[in-house]
Amino acid sequence: MFISYFDESGDDGFPQYSSPIFLLTSIYMPHTKWKDNYNRIYEGRKELKDKYGFPIKLEFHTKHLLTNKNPYRSYRWSDSQRHDIIFDLFQLISELDIRIINVAIIKENIKKEDYSVLDRALTYNIQRIENDLSKLNSPDTNFLIITDEGRIGKMRKTSRKIQRFNLIPSKIYPGTVYQENIRLFIEDPLAKESDESYFLQIADLVSYITYLYSIKKFINKEWANRVKNVLSMEDVILLLNTIKPRLNCKAAMDNEFGIVNYPKR
């Protein structure tokens, strides 16, 4: 059995939206590695407390930390300290026994007004977990999804649909599709509050940093000034390279970090 955790950056609205990209991240691991991963994250949080005074039980929300919003403002961390906190956590992620998939939906490339952003992002992500685990050729490769409450209804609808009816574009015959139902995913997505899950907070961190990369890489837009005060694009590339051994780079062969990005121009 594998356990996957999903979190997102940006909004899933379309045609009305506040973010030009929606980024959905999954991290997944064998259930036998869950305890070891949890213990390593807990030790890493203790190290953050010793170095920066970051409370062990304080929820880590990447965007709010980078932009110095509450509840982090009261700790009076400098830009360089917040920069170092991010880098320390990425080093921690690189030491976990996990796999990571990122899916970016590029809204300016969407042609159809009825395009469902979350449905597409979740479908692409589940398909790639399925593809990865199916290569293990083991009876113990089923997986389940844990996510926060926010989009659980929409995610449940999509996950049920693709277990019955899942169309895959053919690489051999462009413009055609074939049916291949999702077999390894079990249960509906399960809800959990992010402040109660270190793994959801790790997914949030990877998702937001990948979102920043995608904003520059895929649509060449600028970040908010508060973010630029803490991180540069060079920093973001260093961070993604730090966790590259954990990234499922085969999820998308047209990007060095395996970031699935649709629609294409």
Image (cartoon, rainbow, N blue to C red):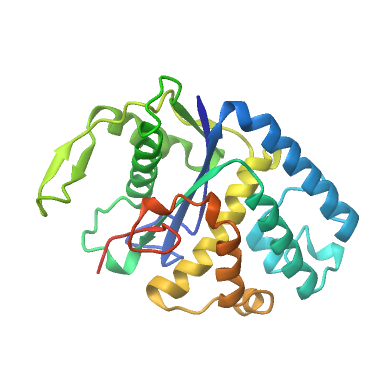
Q: Nearer the viewer, residue 14 or 228?
A: 228
30 relative to 259 in the view: left or right: right
Would you place residue 237 above or below residue 55 in this image?
A: below
Q: Quadrant of residue 135?
A: top left
Q: Tally the marks.
A: 0
Is 20 above or below relative to 186?
A: below
Image location of residue 4, percent across then percent down: 52, 36
**Of the pair 125 and 69, the residue shown nearer to us:** 125
Q: Who's the residue at 52% across and 68% down the image?
A: 212
Which percent across, then down, holds residue 214?
Answer: 45, 67
Task: Please indicate whether residue 265 sits to the left or right of residue 48 in the image.
Answer: left
Image point (40%, 39%), residue name: 129
Residue 55 seen in the current view: no
The residue at the point 60 percent across, 40 percent down is: 97
- Residue at far top of view: 139
Comparing 16 with 119, the one in front is 119
Could one spot residue 130 in this view of the protein?
Answer: yes
Q: Position of residue 197 (x, y in %)?
A: 67, 38
Q: Is residue 107 above or below residue 179?
A: below
Which percent across, then down, holds residue 37?
Answer: 67, 37
Between 209 and 235, the residue placed more toward the observer is 235
Residue drawn 84% across the image and 51% down it: 47
Position above or below: 139 against 151: above
Left or right: 256, with 99 as reference point: left
From the image, which quarter does the C terminus lie in?
bottom left
| Side of 104 relative to 174 (left or right) | right
